[in-house]
Image (cartoon, helix red, strand yellow):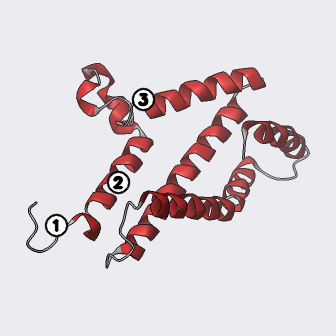
Amino acid sequence: ISIPVFFEQRGIFYKQRDASFHRTATFVLASTLSSWWPKLFESFLAVTVTVFMTNLVDTDASDFVPVLITYVMYGFASNLLFGATMALVAFSTRTMVECFLTSCFVLITLMCFSGFLITFDNIQDHFIWLYWLDPVAWIFRGVNILIFTSKSFEPAEGALA
């Protein structure tokens, strides 16, 4: 769901909340649960295409299916993370311009301190707490560990390591 959709939902939510149609917690829970299946399907498609196009994990490896399923779960977690982040920004700002600026700042901060753009060694000491609090960093490290510990990266018998 994109930011303009969240802005449209916000007006409907305020109207229904003011009429005591439902509580805020009910709306948040329902909108989160209703978006799980499309996000899971989207994550499955994106991860499957990525794995097969880049040949990250050998399809003949004995652990291919568990690695693929775990990789899909990491993709699903990142999809939920970014969806919830965008919803939080959209519901907490007043205008669309303010929302786009805030979301850009949040996304740039998440990406910069994930360890992908700025490595752990290059982060200043007083910003290192952002690295450890960043959920994108945990997902990035988890995917790296998952891929590089799979059977595809074990040396063949008799081969030089």
Residue at left offset 48%, top offset 64% = 52
Residue sitting nearer the eye, 147 or 139: 147
Name the kind of residue labelled 1 in the image: Pro
Which residue is labeled 2 in the image? 142
The answer to whether one can see residue 94 in this image is no
Residue in the foreground of this view, choosing between 104 and 18: 104
Three-letter amino acid code at the position of disc 2: Gly
Instruction: Identify the mark nearer the N-term, 1 or 3.
Output: 3
Q: Secondary structure at mark 3?
A: helix
In the structure shown, which secondary structural element does the residue marked by tag 2 occupy?
helix
The number of numbered badges drawn on the structure is 3
Residue behind mark 1: 155
User: Can you identify the residue that label 3 sits on?
Assistant: 112
Question: Residue flagged by tag 3: what amino acid is it?
Answer: Cys
Label 2 environment density (alpha carbons within 10 Å; few <14, some 14–19, many ≥20): some
Q: Position of residue 36 (x, y in %)?
A: 64, 61
Left or right relative to 73: residue 153: left
Mark 3 and mark 2 residues within 8 Å of each other at the beta carbon: no
Where residue 49 appears, as percent x and y from the top left, is 54, 61
Q: Is residue 106 above or below residue 147?
A: above
Q: Secondary structure at mark 1?
A: loop
Mark 3 → mark 2, Cα distance in angstroms: 17 Å
Q: Position of residue 1 (x, y in %)?
A: 72, 47
Q: Is residue 121 visible?
A: yes
Residue 57's image quarter? bottom left
